[in-house]
Image: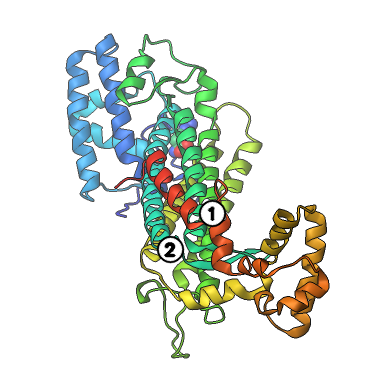
Amino acid sequence: MNQKNDNTPNAMWGGHYSTAPDSIMQRINCSVDVDHVLYAHDIAGSIAHVTMLGDVGIISKEEANQIRDALPKIAQEIADGQMVWNPALEDIHMHVEMRLKELIGEVAGKLHTARSRNDQVVTDLRLYVMEAMEHVVGCITSLQRSLCNRAEEYAETIMAGCTHFQPAQPVTLGHHLMAYVEMLERDKGRMRDARRRMAQCPLGAAALAGTSFPIDRHQTAKLLGFLEPTHNSLDSVASRDFVVEASSSIAMCAVHLSRFAEELVMWSSPLLGWIHLPEQFTTGSSIMPQKRNPDAAELIRAKTGRCMGHVVHLLTLLKGTPLAYNKDLQEDKEPIFDAIASLDLCLSAMRGMVDSFGIHAEKMEQAARAGHSTATDLADWLVRTLRIPFREAHHITGRVVVQAEQRGCALWELPLAVMQTVDARITQDALQVLDVRSSVASRTSYGGTSPRMVRAAIVRAREVYGLEE
Ligand code: ARG
C-alpha cells in the first residue's frame, strides 16, 4: 500500500487539538491497512446517504448531485491503486471524505451531515459480510455439486464404515460423501439465517443517539438493499453479534471441511491406501523421493483452527464493552476478513480434491471386510429367522466371532459346522448375509447406505438443495 507520513494535526477531528498524535498513537489507532477493503461498500453507503440528504432537503439537490457524482470516481481510483494512503487519516472513511474534498472542495464536508463514522463503519461491515455470506454459500453449493457427482460414481463402492475408527459396518463411499452434503447444507442454512438477521441498516443511528435532522432511514436502508433500518440507535452502533454469527457459521463449516480433510489424509496414506490425491493437490519431499504429502488437506485442518480462533477473538472483543461504540470494535475486521478468506480458500481446495481424487476400490473393499464388519448382519439374521430378541442374537454372534478369531479367519470363512456348535439353529442361509455387498444392499432404511438409497439421496439433494447444474 502507498503510504505517506503526515505530521499535521488531524484534519477531521482536530478542531480543539493543538498537536498531532504521537507516532505510536497513530500506529495503534490507524486501521486503514485493514479496512481499506471496505471501500466499495463505504462509497455505496455514502451515495445512499447523500441521495437521501438531497431528497429530504437537508442539503440542496445540487450539492447532493455534486457529491454523488464524485464518489464513484474515488471508488475507481482506489480500484486502480491510485489512492495515497495516509496513516494520519486513520481509516477508509476519512480517506474517502478527504479525497472528496480534494475533488469538489468544501461542499464535501456536507456528506457527513446526520451520520457518524460509528454508524458508517457498521453499515459498511454489514454490507460486506452479507455479500461474503452470499459468496461463500455459492462456493459451498459448488462443493456439494462435486460431492454429489462423486457420490453417484461411487454409489456402489464398498468401504469400511467406522465408529471409533474401528471397522463397524460396511458402507458405500457414495454414502460417506453424501454425509458431507448434508453437513454443508446445514452450514448454508446457518449462513443464510445469519445473513437475514444482518439485513438491517444501521445508517442514521449517527454517533449513538440518532440525529435531529429529518433523515429518512427507510430510504437509505432500501437504497442499500437492506430489508429495513435497525430499530435502536445504541444497538446499531454497539452491536457486532452479526459478525460473531457469521464467523461462527464459518467456523462450523470449516470444522466440517477439517473432518473430511482428516479423512483424506488418512485414506490417502500408503498405510491405508484407499484413495490417491492428484499431484496438483499434494507436495513432494525434498529429501524423501517417494513422498506425496496431502498438504492441501492438512492446511484445511490448520486453517480451521484460525477460523475457530476468530470466533473466540470476536466474542472476547465484545464481552467487556459497555454501550455504545468503543474503539475495541475497530478490531472486529481482521478476524472476520481472515475467516471469510480462509474458508473461501478451504472450500476451493476441498473442491479441487473432491473433483480429482482417485480410489483403490480393491483395498477399500478389503478393509471393509476387516474386523468382522458383518457381525451385525448375522445378529439381524438370527432375529429375523429365529424370531429371538436382538440381545440374545447379539450374544450368540459374539460367540461366533470368538470362533473366527480363534481360527484367525473371517466370519464368512467359518465352516457352518463350527457356527452350529455355537447355535444349532444357524443354517447355510445365514452365510449369505455375511458378504459385505449383501450387507450394504440390505441397508434400505431411509437414509441408509444401500446403493439404491444413496442414489435416491443424491436425487433428493440435487432437487431440494438446488444443486442441479
Ligand atoms: N475506524 C473505526 C472503526 O473501525 C471507525 C469508527 C470510528 N469511530 C470513532 N468514534 N472513533 O471502528
Query: In the rendering, at what x and y percent does residue 315 appear?
Result: 61, 41
Q: Does the Cβ of the disc 2 residue fall within 8 Å of ligand 1?
A: no
Q: What amino acid is labelled 2 in the image?
A: Tyr
| Residue 228 picture location, percent across and down | 41, 19
Q: Residues within 10 Å of mark 2 (few under 14, many from 20)?
A: many
Q: Earlier in the sequence, mark 2 or mark 1?
A: 2
- Return the residue at label 1: 256
Q: Residue at x 54, y 48 (%)?
A: 447
Give the mark toward the camera: 2 or 1: 2
Residue carrying label 2: 154
Q: Is residue 125 left or right of residue 28?
A: left
Please report the residue visible at 47 percent of the width from the left and 78 percent of the height from the top: 293
Q: Is residue 358 left or right of residue 312?
A: left
As measured in the structure, the alpha-carbon distance from the residue carrying label 2 to the one carrying label 1 is: 21 Å
User: In the structure shown, which secondary structural element does the residue marked by tag 1 occupy?
Assistant: helix
Pinpoint residue 123: horizontal percent, then vertical percent. Answer: 41, 30
At mark 2, the secondary structure is loop
Give the vertical position of 338 relative to 58 (above or below). Answer: below
Amino acid type at circle 1 is His
Whether residue 328 is visible, yes or no, is yes
Residue placed most toward the observer, 369 or 8: 369
Q: Quadrant of the N terminus?
A: bottom left
Tell me the residue at 24%/33% (across/down). Answer: 100
Q: Nearer the viewer, residue 279 or 18?
A: 279
Q: Nearer the viewer, residue 65 or 167?
A: 167
Residue 165 in view, yes or no: no
Q: Pick whichever, 286 or 25, lies toward us.
A: 286
The answer to whether the residue labelled 2 contacts the one labelled 1, judged by CB atoms less than 8 Å apart, is no
What scheme was used to colour the molecule?
rainbow
